[in-house]
Amino acid sequence: MSYTYDPKNNTLFHKKTELPLDGLEKNFIGACSKCNADVFSISYHTYHDQNAVAAKCTNCGQMYAILYDALWNWTGEHMIRYNCPNSANPEKESSHATENEYYECTNEELKTLQSIPKKKLETVFTPAEIDTLFAKAAGKKHVRQYLYRARKKFDDFNELFDIYLKI
Ligand SMILES: [Zn+2]
């Protein structure tokens, strides 16, 4: 069972199927199975009499798809992968080859970075630092000096956008 989420459009996908958006209420859902912090809903979706809630951990950022039947009986829970442009946009699937080497979705740090709108990154980090962060997160060669400089700004970034980077 593979769920992905597009945070820009609040769209939840099950494999390639889009689950229609039904609301954007923020409710306490439960505890994160990774770090035990509070998980809150981001958006509600309905599909074939099933209800699905997209939710996110307030601490580690792990996202979940929590599934219910038509009467809101809990039926399952799945971790959500962030929407990787290569895998969740069918129409783009064939043309991704070398377009952007960062869009490989290899690990958590990279997924977190990719989920942050570029404008937010550019508010705090220089282009060289952003490149370095992506390279580091992807396990690629990077300039250490830029990484150190970028890390010094993580607190500022967290304060501004409530996103805690761990790279
Ligand atoms: Zn968590």
Image: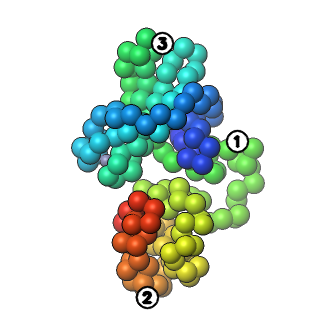
Residue 24: x and y in percent read 52, 35
Location of mark 1 (residue): 90
Name the quadrant containing residue 77.
top left
Which amino acid, mark 2?
Gln
Residue 79: x and y in percent read 41, 39
Frontmost of labels 3 and 2 is: 3
Label 1 to label 3, Cα distance in Å? 29 Å
The count of marks equals 3
Location of mark 3 (residue): 70
Tell whether circle 2 marks a residue whose Cβ is less than 8 angstroms from ligand 1.
Answer: no
67 relative to 134, above or below? above
Label 1 to label 2, Cα distance in Å? 38 Å
Location of mark 2 (residue): 145
The answer to which of marks 1 and 3 sits earlier in the sequence is 3
Visible residue check, residue 52: yes
Residue 142: x and y in percent read 49, 80
